[in-house]
Image (cartoon, helix red, strand yellow):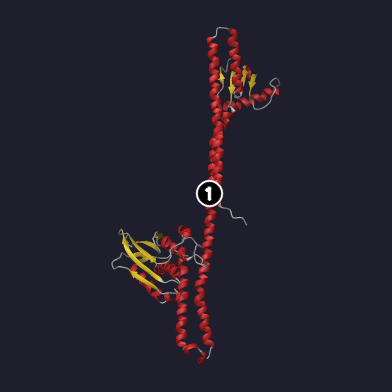
Amino acid sequence: MIRIKWPVALATLFVLLLGWYLLYTQQVLQRVQENSELLSRIYTEVQEGLVSRDPTSETQALLQLQRIVTGAGVPLVVMGPGDTVLTHINLPFEVDDQTVEGQQRIRAYVRRLDERHPPVGDLTGLQHIHYGDSADVRSLRLIPILQATGLLLTVFIGFLVIRYQRRAEGEKAWTAMARELAHQLGTPLSSLAGWLEVLRLPDAERPGDLSDYEIASSIGEDLERLERISHRFELIGTDPELESLSVRQVVGDLEEYLAARIPRLARKGVDLLVDIPHGLPRVKGNEVLLIWALENVVKNALDALAGRGGKITIYAREVGGNWVSLRIRDTGPGVDPEIRDKIFEPGVTSKVGGWGVGLALSRRIVEGVHKGKIELLETVEGTTFQIRLPAADA
């Protein structure tokens, strides 16, 4: 299946419309220049007729002037008393003005001409002239219509492209979230299945002489984890209530949660350093979601340090009195330049087998729920993410 690159297709269409419009405008300009030349020739013929005292020259000048006007393409109808058609030139149809039907057809055409241009001459006299627009004028009249049509077409196609892209991004996000949910549920469910197998064993065959109380405690931890996962995904799909939170307390809870998991998630030694000063302004947020957003960023740092070890630093500072800045820095290899600009998009990841959901969820939580800002900072080495949260009293 061929995938359409909509930005390229839209740009191509725009270039084609622009090229066609420029060509059309150039043709109209050329015709206007030809009309200017025609007026100059008319002026020349009139001057020669006025200067010359020879009746023959005057007659020739008038005949030449008539030929110039005829060649201009302006439809003209000369009518006499009783609206009798005397002569006509440049009509858009062939007609015999010597017949009754021809006279009627020309009169009907003249009525349409008079709606746009009043006739010239004495309507009560021997003759009066009715005229219409030349082909050049009709072309100029089409320009605004063509411009509006081209603009509306471009806007309409652009709207369709944006709608298609948003739908595709939404489908990608929901697919990635479904995979992430299945992944997070898989670990505690597997653990519960293992504990169930242990419970089925006789007491003497249980590994490590585990008691029922120890097994029940472990099952309780897994159930608590399942409840936490369920609650997180329930909140991300709603508009949760926000409350005044202490950044120090939030990061402290995260540190306690990660303390037992860092040795398991990182293959080599990883040090977690936390620097949260006292007296920081409180922020307005949801603790469950905020811890989730921070956890996703820290896990991203742990993945970067897996197999090599290093240091992760979490520190916070007050910014401008209205914001609290949280930075998570690791000493890993940094982010691939090819994905830096789209690292928060669903499905974008540098990990083998990863689904690119964690940072996308963090952006949704920080920016969508907490009206803050998450960004990847430029650093010489390692990776630094900054999360800015509005102060609760701002």
Q: Give the total of numbered labels.
A: 1
Q: Residues within 10 Å of mark 1 (few under 14, many from 20)?
A: some
- Which x, y percent locates residue 247? 34, 67
Q: Secondary structure at mark 1?
A: helix
- Which x, y percent locates residue 353? 53, 68
- Which x, y percent locates residue 41? 55, 19
Comparing 208 with 72, the one in front is 208
User: Can the viewer see residue 270?
Assistant: yes
Residue 185 appears left or right of 380: right
User: Can the viewer see residue 126?
Assistant: no
Q: Is residue 239 above or below residue 123?
A: below
Amino acid type of the residue that numbered disc 1 sits on in the rendered structure? Gly
Comparing 194 with 149, the one in front is 194
Comparing 290 with 111, the one in front is 290
Q: Quadrant of the N terminus?
A: bottom right
- Which x, y percent locates residue 375? 41, 60
Residue 257 placement: quadrant: bottom left
* Residue at mark 1: 158
| Residue situated furthest left in the rendering | 279
